[in-house]
Structure formats: C-alpha cells, structure tokens
Image (cartoon, rainbow, N blue to C red):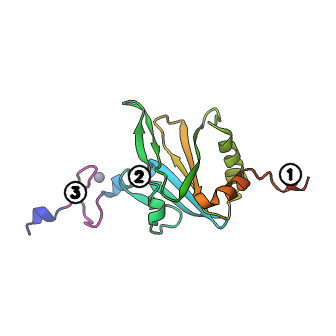
Amino acid sequence: MSKASEEKTCINCGVALVNGRRSLCPDCEAEDLETPSAILMATKNRRLYSRIHFGNYIEMDMLNGNPISRGLLAFRPHWVPTDPWRGHYECPIPEGWARVIDGWFCGVDGHMSNNDIERFHQRWEVEKDYPEFEMVAVFPRTSNVLTCGLEVFVHTEDLWKYAQWINHEGIGHAIA
Ligand SMILES: [Zn+2]
C-alpha cells in the first residue's frame, strides 16, 4: 500500500489527520460539538442519565462520556428547510415512542408556542421533578438564533403516566 492512500484527511476541512481513528481534526470536532444541531436530555427513574450533543458529524454524551445507545441515536435530528435561508432541526419519532410536545420558545420575550411547554418548563426545569418513566427532551436549533425548538417523547405505553405528571399541581394543591 502506498503512503498516500494511508493518509487520512479531515472530512470537514481537509487537513491531514494525525490520529487515523478519527474522521475530524480536533478543531472541527470541537466546533461540531460546540454548535450542536440539537441537545438531547434523557431522564429515567427520577434522574437525568444522558445529555447528548448532536453535531453535524458526531454526537457525544456530554454528561458522562458513555457510548450512546442505539435507542437514543434514533432521535438524531435532521434539517427541515422552510426557505433557502431558514429552517429548523426536527427529530424523527422512533418506533414505540410518542411525541407529546412539539413546539418552540423564544429566549427574548419568553414566548412559548403552547401551554404544555409552560407546564413542562415548570415541572422539569423549575421543580426538577423528573418522572419515574423514561422521557426524552430534545432542544433542536432553528435558523432564528433567539428561538429554540422543544420536542418531548415518552414511550407510548407511558402516555397516561405522562398526562398525570404534566398536570400534577404539586403537594400543596393535592392536599387542598
Ligand atoms: Zn478539520
């Protein structure tokens, strides 16, 4: 085998690679993960167990560095163009899962595209009350830098549990 055919180059910028195991140079790898097309957060048994950055080329679990299960890789988002300059990333719905929230929120005026996002924000972010059942929340990027998507998934058999969780009013309300 000639030396030239052994030389690997970065698939993004074309620079020669020192470590032949990877397909991106260190600069492009860092950039790919710093500007992810989506961030996926997965919870189960009341704890956050995975936070995945989906880059254009690679994906990495930023929470614990563990290999990503095929089940979570199935959520890898794809770009959906709305015109030549604008669009957003969107997740497929893997088999056995239901998408219970499909919306977006705006970081400047606090606008949320539906009430469930507000409820979700309260339960999940403010109260940090992660449910017992498995739940996947994906934050896909949009071409509007101020707007972020939110897609939430649960297993189809957990739809009723999700309805109870999202509508839960907290201990004070339950007793009253
Ligand atoms: Zn590169």
Callout 2 touching callout 3 (CB < 8 Å): no
In the rendered structure, find residue 55 and report the number of the disc placed on it. 2
Specify the amino acid type for callout 3.
Thr
Specify the amino acid type for callout 2.
Gly
Q: Which residue is mark 1?
A: 173
| Mark 1–mark 3 distance (CA, rounded to whole Å) | 60 Å
Q: Which residue is mark 3?
A: 9
Q: How crowded is the residue under tag 2: few (<14 C-alpha within 10 Å), some, or many (20+)?
A: many
**Element at label 3:** loop
The reply to whether the residue tagged 1 has its Cβ within 8 angstroms of ligand 1 is: no
- What is the quadrant of the N terminus in the image? bottom left
Q: How crowded is the residue under tag 3: few (<14 C-alpha within 10 Å), some, or many (20+)?
A: some
Residue depth check, mark 1 versus mark 3: number of the one nearer the observer: 1
| Mark 2–mark 1 distance (CA, rounded to whole Å) | 42 Å
Left or right: residue 139 compared with residue 80: right
**Element at label 2:** loop
Residue 135 appears in the rendering: no
The earlier-in-sequence mark between 2 and 3 is 3
In the picture as drawn, the residue positioned furthest to the right comes out as 176
The reply to whether the residue tagged 3 has its Cβ within 8 angstroms of ligand 1 is: no
Specify the amino acid type for callout 1.
His
Q: Which residues are magenta?
A: 8-23
- Percent x, y of residue 110: 65, 36
Q: Residue at x 64, y 63 (%)?
A: 133
